Image (tube, coloured by chain):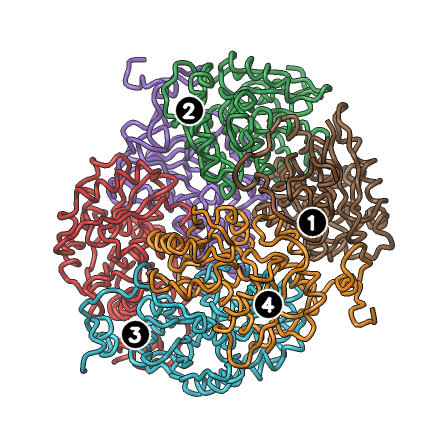
Chain colours: A cyan, B red, C purple, D green, E brown, F orange
Amino acid sequence: MKILLLNPNTSAAMTERMAEAAAAALAPDVRVTPLTAMRGLPYIASRAEAQLAGAAVLETLAEHQAGHDAAVIAAFGDPGLVAARELFDLPVVGMAEAAMLTACMLGQRFSIVTFSRKLLPWYEDAVHQAGLHARCAGLLAAEGEFRSVTEVQHELESEIVALAARAAENGADAVILAGAPLTGLAARVGAAVPVPLVDPLAAALGQAQALVRMGARAPASGRFARPGPKPATGLSPALAAWIEHREGEPG
Amino acid sequence: MKILLLNPNTSAAMTERMAEAAAAALAPDVRVTPLTAMRGLPYIASRAEAQLAGAAVLETLAEHQAGHDAAVIAAFGDPGLVAARELFDLPVVGMAEAAMLTACMLGQRFSIVTFSRKLLPWYEDAVHQAGLHARCAGLLAAEGEFRSVTEVQHELESEIVALAARAAENGADAVILAGAPLTGLAARVGAAVPVPLVDPLAAALGQAQALVRMGARAPASGRFARPGPKPATGLSPALAAWIEHREGEPG
Amino acid sequence: MKILLLNPNTSAAMTERMAEAAAAALAPDVRVTPLTAMRGLPYIASRAEAQLAGAAVLETLAEHQAGHDAAVIAAFGDPGLVAARELFDLPVVGMAEAAMLTACMLGQRFSIVTFSRKLLPWYEDAVHQAGLHARCAGLLAAEGEFRSVTEVQHELESEIVALAARAAENGADAVILAGAPLTGLAARVGAAVPVPLVDPLAAALGQAQALVRMGARAPASGRFARPGPKPATGLSPALAAWIEHREGEPG
Amino acid sequence: MKILLLNPNTSAAMTERMAEAAAAALAPDVRVTPLTAMRGLPYIASRAEAQLAGAAVLETLAEHQAGHDAAVIAAFGDPGLVAARELFDLPVVGMAEAAMLTACMLGQRFSIVTFSRKLLPWYEDAVHQAGLHARCAGLLAAEGEFRSVTEVQHELESEIVALAARAAENGADAVILAGAPLTGLAARVGAAVPVPLVDPLAAALGQAQALVRMGARAPASGRFARPGPKPATGLSPALAAWIEHREGEPG
Amino acid sequence: MKILLLNPNTSAAMTERMAEAAAAALAPDVRVTPLTAMRGLPYIASRAEAQLAGAAVLETLAEHQAGHDAAVIAAFGDPGLVAARELFDLPVVGMAEAAMLTACMLGQRFSIVTFSRKLLPWYEDAVHQAGLHARCAGLLAAEGEFRSVTEVQHELESEIVALAARAAENGADAVILAGAPLTGLAARVGAAVPVPLVDPLAAALGQAQALVRMGARAPASGRFARPGPKPATGLSPALAAWIEHREGEPG
Amino acid sequence: MKILLLNPNTSAAMTERMAEAAAAALAPDVRVTPLTAMRGLPYIASRAEAQLAGAAVLETLAEHQAGHDAAVIAAFGDPGLVAARELFDLPVVGMAEAAMLTACMLGQRFSIVTFSRKLLPWYEDAVHQAGLHARCAGLLAAEGEFRSVTEVQHELESEIVALAARAAENGADAVILAGAPLTGLAARVGAAVPVPLVDPLAAALGQAQALVRMGARAPASGRFARPGPKPATGLSPALAAWIEHREGEPG
């Protein structure tokens, strides 16, 4: 099984970190292809940035999805998730949605803990898009300063652990440690929090594997069937070709 | 008062049509600036296309919003609406949201009637994004073939009127005639439908005027405050400058 | 365009104040007719009082609506709104509903700030009647004493501003300053609050103008069509005549 | 125990019918005082009429509630229910709310069947006001003509029974026969419908008895505590006295 | 009228206490038959225990329901309520559901106060099962230690009263004193709390009487009709006989 | 990884069938232990039966869970799921919940198709318990007669396929083929339905693997922490020992 692991941020260091962390969540017969967005922001922290990242996700998938069994959009907030599901035929999994659905099997309510207040509006929107607000006991963000988004999970580790514990006290049955920069933190600090932690990357890879092993086919009709061909202006070549149904043609 | 009327489709003919129709919905002291998206599809009909159009909306606003009091995103489905509200300081109005909020003052439940089944998933998403699904009595689409999206409101007029009447019979207190290509139809056929019709362009212009006259300020904090500066890669010059907070600088 | 501005309280001073404040929210071609309820309470502060005021609204409209393009019920809480929409043919706008719908275009969640705890149950009911509780981040009331309802916006200005700022901190993207006695306060103190303020009277006038310019017709069938004639006992002459469909007849 | 049975319609014949039907639903130690509204319409069929009837309910209760243990507002739609609960200290029960709450113990979903389409908007509003729309499987109305509202339960009996059976087939676990003119029908035709029928008058009397036997006290604070004294203009003498807290004083 | 009062806990002392307290809530012509579960836990405090208690409820009803007009499941949390309604023909009332439905007639929102934090998850589930979460202003539990579940209502009386008062301050219009061990406390301390208190046992008995006096029949079809006969393995003799439709046969 | 596959029905033939079908959904390093309930009904088809089966699930888990990494409750409807999660420390997955959560990644709305109308009330309850009713486009059941529950997926194959196709036409983006007896049918008929099919057993096994690979720990506090020890009466020895926290002790 081959899973495309698409980082919608432009930071290659983050992609590398996630590719390393992925190993623990894969069955012996699964491989991932890590990819970094070519356009956009080093890390997404707003709905405007997510709008742009979603377009970059479609461009990247159009170019690289061939030969994969599933794709994971590796940014909490799931930029371009619905659009990608509609446009392409392989299963597409978002880290936020996968983390929340997984958390639903660990209890009645989950909380989301992240490393910066700036991310909260975007993450709140992700909760609503998933239709799971009634299951969400709240979103909490660290207040601490940090120097590097790559190191933030170490810099703010104790504050994040304290927030997760507080979330548990306030009624969360499980806590999602949200944001690609926190990948791997759940495994490291799980013992320090009294309720189960959800690692969104591990959850997304678990869900991608589940979908592939179940053998779900792409829809031939309905809300998520691939749209018919249409002329495109000013888009990347691979995406324009895909939208115009010329993806098999010579360039 | 100056309102930017932004067509996120690449069809200039549609923009022109809307600019003409706008006149009837404007107070004597209001002018509109019509604009057409430079990138994307001739008309948007899917969530994938809306994802791309939303990015184009941000590019266009970054380049042209200066000097306007408000902007209208003139495609039912409101591509880029939340992102634009977050990124820019002027009030931004979407045709779908404005039509639905307006319809809420005409009754308890509205229905949405449009000219093609392909549009339904996108429009349904717009209803949910506005949080108004409990007020929506259903979405109906014409089944008839049409030759030109510019002429579809004439080609399918009788079927659309029949659908609006059926919606009324099934419990809609008001009917939205949705999709930019239907602009102006409500005024023409209102007498043939027993409940009030909502023209989304007229509604959006009405809401934009209401917001400007009320004098609402842009937020300095919270979910819709402008994000801080951030380095951007591969975006249009005006949008990159705006995101990097260099919009006042010489190019 | 002529808009009937109906104060359902019996306080003529308040009506005068609102008529003055209205000017700023009107396009050059719009005029308002201010009216004060002849029966009821000097200011409404409970659901029981709103029940009675709603009946007075119907009496007043029956007597004065002729010759107007729209009516505004100028008490936050919207006494008699649904009944008036059903009974009469012109568009009827409520200050609470209009303020909330307008706030929905300024962000995801609004808060409502008012000058007395006594008003909260009635205002909460208005939020639920509008079906917008999921968009409401909370209702806050000043605790301070005040001598005059006419002067309360000055007496408690600093507390109300502080509450609005607190609402913003707690997640409101926009704040409605609710209650007819606060009319005009939003314009005066907007700069002191980090999120946009909504003035319910300005919002209601904006919505009334939007409805009239869009040209929505009265329904000929359905939930809001005018009920057929029925004999009435013990009602005011104009209202009895309207209900009995004798409104055109000589007295 | 003494229960005030208040008919908000002006039809004394209907009051008499309900007073007779009440007997079967009362414990041996309970008596009812039947009353008819002095103002309003012979039978309420719209939200406008309910707005006026609600005011009449308050007038009537102010004059007659003394010496009773509970009051029943005997019109499906519950005009003035919330206002009456707020204003007076005895438990007040509405026929619609009581019927729906009772139905909730007979299954997951109830349907409402009535004798005229004109009543549906008002009854739908009652379902929403009770917050029980998720439990409502639908509202159905007879299409047949009838000569007399007093005899309609006989004139349309077979159509109403057929509608109730259809509601059961479509997923209703219980069926409410709604509208004061249908009082007593449930007992007569229960055997002909495969799911339990709810008689709103019997339900309301059952709930009133349950509240009285449980001994619930009137609130001294909060949303339903009696409002403080306030000057009133143009109201009935008893109601004005009650609102001004002069109810114990000599006239 | 004969009502079966079934304690799903194995504590006979609690059953006795409830049988005594029942008297005040019964009309002169009503008698109760108290019963104690033969299997399970001395008092239920978790969903797992409720799952087991629900099975015990079915066993007990199968053996004892004959000759009764209604049954009350006398544990807040309502173990086996839906199953019992489906399986048996007499009306079955749960203490939690009955308390909440009754509270809905005393105000807009109720709170639930109980004597131990351990009970909260189970009670929260009961609120959701009743579909009344939107009406629930919160659940509060005493923190104090207590020696005996039989005496807890005396041991923690002052803390419970304080919690009920706090619930009222925080917006509850009525407060349910939840948990069989608190039976009778509401009547004793009602004067000390500014909003009405609901005693779940009194509420359940009130609702059972209301259902019986209304004369609702058992369903012959639909979601709550008795399932057809089916072979059973390893169940109690009476329950197996009932499930196999051999209940009338000699043992 | 070892997964306990627990059939809550007493039919060993069904367990065997599911054990065979499981293979296709397992990674190379995963094994299942199939188990059949010792008490209850040959197949569960009502909420009463599910109440009893849930108790049997707890008994079986208490006896057999040791040494497993996760457990799957292999009946659509998930008897005992919440109770098992609370009582035991390993992840527990229900077929209905897992199928619905999986379907949420394949589209906006799913439908559930099953082989008998009798199952619908129980399955509807499962949808509500999962909090996913807003994502459910409806439940459909075959009307055809069948001789054997073991063979029903062959006997009614064409009707079930037709229902799935109809569900797709009516707006389902994915269709769940529900009920243990349909295990394996999705893989066989997927090509005949235009939207993806979900096999609940495959989904449950996928979710169990995802939870185990993510390494979620059991909660030490909160709603799903194991309850403290408590004396038990009349329960199976292993369950009593577990509830009394004597599970490590010699029998």
Pointers 2 and 4 within a single chain: no
CA neighbours of label 4 inside 10 A, class few (<14), some (14 to 19), many (20+): many
Relative to C59, say whether F148 is above or below.
below
Residue A106 locus on image (x, y percent) = 59, 66
- Label 1 and label 2: CA atoms lie apart by 41 Å
Residue identified by numbered label 3: B239
Residue F5 - label: 4
| Residue that carries the numbered disc 1 in the rendered image | E54
Give residue D159's mark.
2
Secondary element at tag 2: helix
In percent of width and height, residue B82 lies at 37, 62
Give the amino acid at mark 1. Answer: Gly
Residue A129 place in picture, x, y as percent: 43, 61
Helix, strand or loop at label 3? It is helix
Label 1, secondary structure: give it. Answer: helix
Report which quarter residue E97 is drawn in: top right
Task: Specify few, some or many for label 1: CA neighbours under 10 Å numbering under 14, 14-19, or 20 or more.
Answer: many
Q: Are marks 1 and 2 on the same chain?
A: no
Q: Give the letter of the chain under mark 3.
A: B
Q: Nearer the viewer, residue D176 or B119?
A: D176
